[in-house]
Image (cartoon, helix red, strand yellow):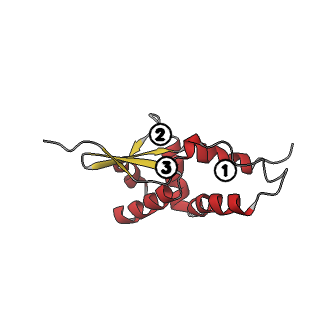
Amino acid sequence: MSKPAAAIPATPDASTETPCCPPMAQQRIDSATAVNLSAAFKALGDPVRLQLMSMIASAPDGEICVCDLTPGFEVSGSTISHHLKTLREAGLVDAERRASWVYYRPRPALMRQLATLLTPRD
């Protein structure tokens, strides 16, 4: 008998949150917002994690199996797992285990918050 699909714990659900703030080019962000969003920016500050995030966010079906992510890199599977854990803990992706594989999908609300914050003045 197979195990049911299980969600892998992540950070609190950002999909129910409203946009965090106006663009920083328009208004200074407060310290609490800076602390909350800095983890996501820090997670994206690594080239491998940035590439992983790009692969996950652009996945045709809205999600991608770790088995499709790993071959795209010249690092070990355990290193990829570490990077994916960092992205999960930063709230950028959600993960769901299905049998022996884990599927990743982006968390659009946090991605929108980061994009809004970085919007330049017109």
Secondary structure beneath label 2: loop
Say which amino acid is labelled 2: Ala
- Foreground: 37 or 48? 37
Residue name at image x 57 percent, y 41 percent: 16
Say which amino acid is labelled 3: Val
Q: Using the numbered discs, state the Cα–Cα distance from disc 3 to disc 1 in whole angstroms.
A: 14 Å
Residue name at image x 24 percent, y 46 percent: 99
Which residue is at the far top?
61
Label 2: few (<14), some (14–19) or many (≥20) C-alpha neighbours in 10 Å: some
Q: Using the numbered discs, state the Cα–Cα distance from disc 2 to disc 3 in whole angstroms.
A: 12 Å
Secondary structure beneath label 3: strand
Viewed as shown, does residue 36 lie left or right of 98?
right
Q: Using the numbered discs, state the Cα–Cα distance from disc 1 to disc 2 in whole angstroms.
A: 20 Å
Viewed as shown, does residue 5 lie left or right of 114?
left
Q: Nearer the viewer, mark 2 or mark 3?
A: 3
What residue does disc 1 label?
A: 114
Say which amino acid is labelled 1: Leu
Label 3: few (<14), some (14–19) or many (≥20) C-alpha neighbours in 10 Å: many
- Foreground: 2 or 54? 2
Residue 45 lies, in percent from the top left, at 60, 63
Secondary structure beneath label 1: helix
Numbered badge on residue 59: 2
Numbered badge on residue 93: 3
Residue 4 lies, in percent from the top left, at 24, 42
Q: Which of the two labelled residues, at mark 2 and mark 3, occupies the earlier sequence position?
A: 2
Viewed as shown, does residue 27 lie left or right of 106?
right
Residue name at image x 53 percent, y 51 percent: 92
Q: Quadrant of the N terminus?
A: top left
Image quadrant where residue 3 sits: top left
Instruction: Give the mark count.
Output: 3
Q: Are marks 3 and 1 in contact (CB under 8 Å)?
A: no
